[in-house]
Amino acid sequence: MAELRELATSAGAEIAGEFLQSKSKPDPATLIGRGKLEEIAGAAAAAEAELIIFDHDLTPSQQRNIEAAVPARVIDRTQLILDIFARHARTREGQLQVELAQLEYLLPRLSGRGVEMSQLGGGIGTRGPGETQLESDRRKIYRRVRHVQQQLESVRRIRAQQRQRRESAPVATVALVGYTNAGKSTLFNALTRAGVEESKRMFATLDPTIRAVTLPSRRTVLLSDTVGFIRNLPHTLVTAFRATLEEVQRASLLLQISDITSPYGREQEAQVEKVLEELQAHKQQRIRVLNKIDLLPPLVREDLRDDARTVHVSAKTSAGTARLLEAIDECLQEDPLNRVRLSVPQQEGKALALIAARARVFSRSFRDGSVEMEIQAPDSVLRRLQKFVLA
């Protein structure tokens, strides 16, 4: 219920009241049963409520039956999440993805939306002048779905071309994944200084953002911020956001961000795992990042211990982010690091500048107009310095 409250608030609703119903099995006609429905109808009338939100997916017939009994519009969890997504989609791609999910949700709910959309009867004297309103609306929606899918396919092709160009260079992609509101965008900003919108609202990030980050080894990686996951994330959204979520599928490493202060942390991590399985990304290597340690008592913070696959951070204060960058460095296999000795003539300014920018220097000495040094650098850099390597 706390999560539903947060979702409703993110959509701009003011909450007038809440109801819980315990049943051994859902009522096929109204989900909650006739008695509870009458109770809700009375409370909604007294509070002059305009909307009733169910934290459960409603079938089209359940939604119609409930709306016939209450003095307010009725939506379910999926509709609420779609509304929040529609509010927060900024790019053309994000808007197309939300529209596709909304259309796919709407299609099975068309029949019965008023007399003007009902099927005409068969037989003599009941045939209509042609296509019914329902059939006309269905045809228009199918046409629009095909149009949106074609546009999204072109987006996917462009993304694939961009990804191919990125993958042709030895630059790894690291994707941030996690439950909505775990602090992914705040951490993304702490690592990249990108200025992505940070918000306590759910699903503030819909459109993926990619930025380059330099690791302690001087290797460059691309960091990708992605849409947050949530319990019972509507399947239509996972399908519609396939173009965006491909960044997760193709990433070399996942940073799984969790809110260490959440009392529902275990359930939230189980939901993240479920979505990653649906994306077939659950076998990728990952680092667990436990965020918001600044909200813990000082004595608890002192007892926290990092390891190779778990790092504790505060995205807000940047505490632990240096250790996180080191952990990313240790995990990545792309463009591996090697340690070599070089002798570079002092007039080779371009090579010296490359070493200063892209390598870690452990020792340096000057001899006969050359700089002798021991460095650690990625293979892509060492190939350009091959002629200076000492045997």
Image (tube, grey):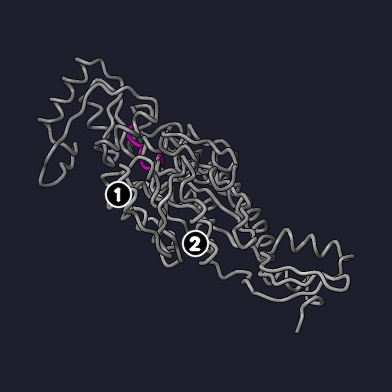
Q: Which residue is mark 1?
A: 265
Residue 143 visible in this rendered orientation of the protein: no
In the rendered view, would you say 19 is above or below 379? above
* Residues drawn in magenta: 106-113
The type of residue carrying mark 1 is Gly
Residue 75 visible in this rendered orientation of the protein: yes
Q: Residue furthest bottom?
A: 391
Secondary structure beneath disc 1? Answer: helix
The residue positioned 46% from the left and 34% from the top of the image is 199
Image depth: mark 2 or mark 1 in front: 2
Q: Nearer the viewer, residue 151 or 355?
A: 355
Could you give the CA–CA distance between mark 2 and mark 1, rounded to whole angstroms?
Answer: 22 Å
Total numbered labels placed on residues in the image: 2
Q: Is residue 110 magenta?
A: yes
Q: Residue 249: horizontal and vertical position, in percent?
A: 50, 61
Q: Residue 33: horizontal and vertical position, in percent?
A: 13, 35
The N terminus, quarter of image: top left
Q: Which mark is residue 327?
A: 2
Q: Nearer the viewer, residue 381 or 303?
A: 303
